[in-house]
Amino acid sequence: MNRGFFIGIFLLVGCAGMNVLAQTDTIADQKIEEIVITAKVPVVTIKADKMTYHIESAVARGQGSLYEVLEMLPGVMISNDGKIYLNGQSGINVLMDGKQTYLSGQELVTLLKSTPAAAAEKIDLITHPSSRYDASGNAGLIDIRTKKMRLRGMNLTANGSFRQGKYGVGNGSLSINRREGLFNFYLTYSYSQGTDCNELQIDRLFTGLREPDKVELSVRQDSYRKYPYTSHYYRAGIDFFASARTVVGVYTNGNLHQSRMPGDMFTYFSAPSYASPDSMLHTSNVEDRKKKNFTAGVNLTHQLDTAGKVVDASFDYLHFGYTDNLDLHSSSQNRPGRVDSVKGDVPGAINLYTGQVNLTLPFAGKWELEAGAKFSFISIDNEASYADNKGNGWVPNEALSQHFVYDENINAGYVQCGATFKPFYIRAGLRVENTRIDGRLTGGEAQIDSSFTSRYTNLFPSLLLEYAFRQNKLSLFYGRRIVRPNYGDLNPFVYIFDDYTFEQGNTALKPMKSDRLELTFIYKNLFRAGFLYSRTHDVIVKSFFEKDNRQVYVTPMNLSTGTSLGPRIYTGNLPLASFWTVNANVACVYNHYRWTDTAGERVNKRATLIGSLTNQLDFGKGWSMELSGSYNGKMAAGQATLSPIWQVDGGIRKKVLKNNGTIRLFARDIFHSYREKMMLTVPGQQAFTNERQDNTQVGISFTYRFSKGYEVKESRRKSSVDESKRINL
């Protein structure tokens, strides 16, 4: 790693902040030289339908990248494969500024890790989404809101951070916003460079189907990967204020991520009659990955009158491309001097076009009607070319070399009505979505049907009832949601980990559909207690199948049903002393999964305790400190059972340069406790995994903000991009 890069980032931050020239404006002949913000923004804001976390108000949990911020939120857990859980439930939809990120799994992790936390202002955890949102997202929505400058003239924010674990990671970002006349221009660029690592241990016990307690073979796999990476991220746009009621905006953002992932896996085979391994397989694997995504769009917002009637429309385009080059070499004690090799070239591209229009019509003083329509077209084209070398030169592997083409069209419309009859508020909506899918696989030997077609239409009602009394609220929410398979899970290509472990998509996957009911009580926006019930059909989980010669295929499958229920309690900004505030989250969720396999009907059920506690101490004179901890208990997750996970984080913050600058020292996973463990039982096999990444880190960051001018109202800009979460290739 080039340490000079990190030094340069910090110098850039300091110098840029000190030398930017700003333009001041006049209002009523009064020149504004400086704006001083004295109001303290709370870390957490609690509402009936969502909870908002203000990143800048946090001391330790607002540093590093957006990935670090997200995984530290109360009730949020991100597994190493990129699956996001909220209070023990998966199926979370992640948005940025109300727009889908187009990504899920490792692709979403890549974007979040390359985007600095300094670029975000707040994060909304939306538990009661209205019909205006897409119906996707089983357990709710996470909306990351980037910073919006509201001052005329030149506004600048620069940030640099470095954190050290086993290896180092650095981020640098610069955001510029200029509002002048009828135009508002904004630009953000960030660069991330670092090295990550992954330690994985897998123990497999192969048993007889007729004698499940008798172990016929045990296999242990030890893997270690160290991978350096670089990532670029940008966001730019222009807003044109055509009139007092009309705003037109264009924007673009993108990401380029490159990594090289060398790794070694040692596989040890043992029969019950041997006290020690009787054979060993060494697999060396090198992957070169390059991923890029480009998004562009245009949006229009027009106020029809001064009473709040608004129409907005948008159109967006996304291109996501990637290349994955694989070199795998394996040798065995049973074959001395022989090395088997496999190489693969897996390029792919996704193109998505989407547009929508929304209309908001308040009337009669108490009513508000909303309606809208949306379309999206998705096209996927992926190729995989493999070749084998068993000592006789490279020979194309026709069985694994394939070409996958997928086309999807989703058309949707909704209508929603809200009314206030004090002390009651009611919001009812209905969304309809029609989905058309065509896919085909050519070349090779498809493990699942090589072509498929699907047509379905679904209705998604939602209802929110609120009763306000004094400073409290009691609400009841019902909503029907859907989680469509991400595109990576539909891709039937075979991905090779080693000679005995493969991963493959499933073109026969069905979407998950769930019904959610939640009763919530809010006390003075400081305390929230609720009870949730959720019933999901066709739950999508990673399943494990044994094929010939003990080869294990990891394939997404649909389980029959999944049920989740339990209480959730939050406290926000609870003052224990004049200098001490506490945020706490406690939830107990009971997950119950049911499915059928070759052994008959199977059940995995468990109650899980989830909790977090954040202490924030304000010592005055710009000094503050934060200490937080989180715990996720043993949890049922489809066919698997996840072991408990906990970690403790902390940090110190000092405001400098007349409060325009902020220095933070922070530490993550202080006790080196965060380790993912999983147990899986399927017919003929038990598996235990133990995985750790480079989570224990200490870091430093510096942020400088420069702005002069007067505040203007933020325009309402919406985008129609809503399929981003499903890209996971």
Image (cartoon, helix red, strand yellow):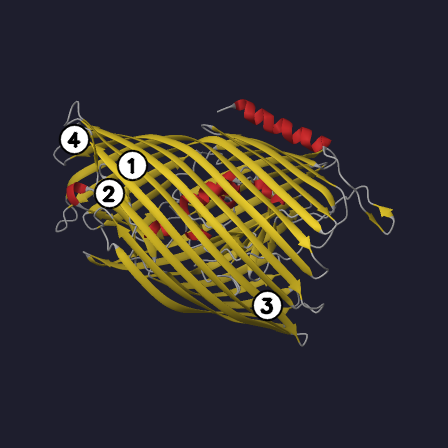
Few, some or many residues within 10 Å of mark 2 (<14, 14–19, 20+): many
**Mark 2 near mark 4, Cβ–Cβ under 8 Å?**
no
Q: Position of residue 498 (x, y in %)?
A: 25, 36
Side of 380 relative to 494 (left or right)? right
Side of 476 relative to 445 (left or right)? right
**Mark 4 near mark 1, Cβ–Cβ under 8 Å?**
no
**Mark 4 — residue?**
275
What amino acid is labelled 2 in the image?
A: Leu
The answer to which quarter of the image holds residue 717 is bottom right
Few, some or many residues within 10 Å of mark 3 (<14, 14–19, 20+): some
Say which residue appears at 65% left-offset and 68% top-offset. Answer: 309
What amino acid is labelled 1 in the image?
A: Gly
What amino acid is labelled 3 in the image?
A: Leu
Disc on the earlier residue, 2 or 1: 1
Disc on the earlier residue, 4 or 3: 4
Which residue of the protein is positioned furthest toward the bottom in this rendering? Answer: 364
Side of 358 relative to 539 (left or right)? right
Is 68 located above or below residue 11 in the figure? Answer: below
- At mark 1, the secondary structure is strand
**Mark 2 — residue?**
400
